[in-house]
Image: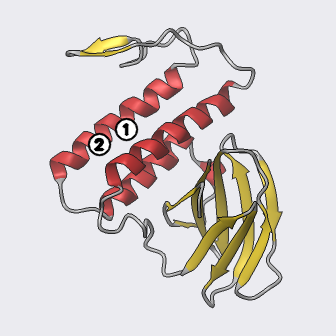
Amino acid sequence: MKGLLLLVLLRLSGLSFSQQSVAREWNNILLEAIRNDYARPTVHARNLYHHSIIVYDSWAAFDQTRQTFLLGDTFHDYICSFDGIAVPIDVQAARHAAISYASYQFIRSRYTNSPNFSQGTDSEIDFRVKLNDGTIFINWSDRILNRIKVFSISGQLLADISPMTQNKISFPFDYPAGLYSIIFKFNDELIPYLILKD
């Protein structure tokens, strides 16, 4: 499993990622991480506050008319240097990627030691994902897996697979290093995985 970090993120029932903003998606993922952690109200309040700053600044960084909260500014005694960035051709995709990467790193750093971090979902579906030599191997329990979709972090659909076998499948994953999401559809339940390929 070298070069691959897997994180089961959340359980979605009957929702598509396209129906919510990326900020809302990651806020739901953070709330799921909080539910799986110890009861630490002040810590979770601080983490929600920090995450909202990360999401806002990741969004505002791509618009020179917007005032960032921390980027390029000083908050108390903390200085955050930022000289701006060139505005990309596809601003929405760039914002999606920036918010997703920042949120993923934030949640991973703050909740790795949570008691149920490796679970990350309240789903009863049991399945395993691993990457080996450019191939994804997936095994799942006896529930019916209808579809697998692989997306780049910018939201581009890379693969749409309907498994023909009952409990396992493998397919090439020869994409460049980066962050990807895999969405598994078990009947009406959508379960996304986030994969960071080094």
Q: CA distance from mark 1 to mark 2?
A: 6 Å
Mark 2 nearby-residue class (10 Å; few <14, some 14–19, many ≥20) = some
- The answer to the question of whether label 1 and label 2 lie on touching residues, with beta carbons closer than 8 A, is yes
Q: Which residue is mark 1?
A: 51
Q: Is residue 68 left or right of residue 95?
A: left
Identify which residue is drawn at 52% across, 26% down: 59
Write the residue at 68% across / 33% down. Answer: 93
- Callout 1, which amino acid? His
Q: Is residue 159 above or below residue 18?
A: below
Q: Nearer the viewer, residue 132 or 88?
A: 132
Structure colour scheme? secondary structure
Residue drawn 31% across the image and 42% down it? 48
Q: Which mark is residue 24?
A: none
User: At which x and y percent is residue 3?
Assistant: 60, 54
Image coordinates of residue 37 in percent, x first then y, are 28, 62
**Image quadrant of residue 153?**
top right
Q: In the rendered view, does 138 fall on the left or right side of 53?
A: right
Instruction: Specify whether 98 is left or right of 135.
Output: left
Query: Is the residue 6 above or below the residue 89 in the image?
Result: below
**Residue 88 at x, y = what percent?**
70, 20
> Closer to the camera, 184 or 84?
84
Judge whether 143 appears above or below 121 on screen: below
The residue pinned by badge 2 equals 47
